[in-house]
Image: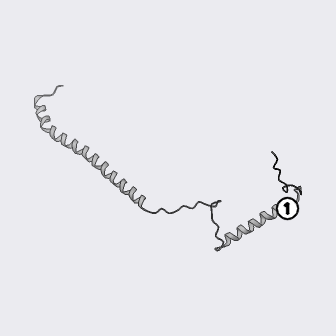
Amino acid sequence: MGIAPIDLQAIFTQVDKVGRSQAAQNEGHTMAKAIQGNEIQKKTEELLNQVNETQNTGEGPEKVNDHSHRNDHGRKNNKRKEDEEETAEKDNRYVLRDPSLGNKIDISL
C-alpha cells in the first residue's frame, strides 16, 4: 500500500516537531554527561584536598612497640616470650657445640 498525497501533507507538517524533539533528547544526554563529569571532578578534588586516615598495618617488623602503655596484651606477649626462651634452653641442652667454633677467622685466599 502506498502513501497518499494527503498523508504526506500531514507528515511534512509534523517533521519539524520530530526534529526538535530528537535534538532536545540528544542535548539532554550531553547535558547529563556534562553534569556527571562536573560532579566526578568535584569529588576527586575533595578527595585530593582531604587528609586520609592511616590504615592499621598489623603486627610486623615495622611496628613500633610502646612499652609505656602495657596492658594484658603486653603481659601475654611477655609470657609467650618466656615460654619460647624455655623451649630454646631445652633444645640447646641436646645440641653439641664445638668450643673453638667462631673464635678464629681464616683470611687466606
* Position of the C terminus by quadrant: top right
Q: Secondary structure at mark 1?
A: helix
Please name whichever residue, 36 or 86, is drawn nearer the observer in this view of the structure. Answer: 86
Residue occupying the point 15% across, 39% down: 16
Q: Position of residue 106 (x, y in %)?
A: 83, 50
Q: Nearer the viewer, residue 66 or 107?
A: 107
> Is residue 57 left or right of 86 when viewed as pictured?
left
Counting from the top left corner in percent of width and height, residue 77 is at 71, 67
Q: Is residue 97 left or right of residue 73?
A: right
Query: Residue 67, image x and y in percent?
Result: 66, 71
Task: Name the quadrant of the N terminus.
Answer: top left
The one of 10 and 62 positioned closer to us in this rendering: 62
Residue underneath mark 1: 90
In this picture, is 34 found above or below 1?
below
- Specify the quadrant of the image occupied by residue 27: top left
- Seen from the viewer's position, the closer of residues 13 and 16 is 16
| Residue at horizontal 77 percent and vertical 63 percent from the top | 84
The answer to whether 48 appears left or right of 36 in the picture is: right
**Looking at this rendering, what residue extends furthest in the top direction?**
1
Rendered location of residue 76, percent (x, y)? 71, 68
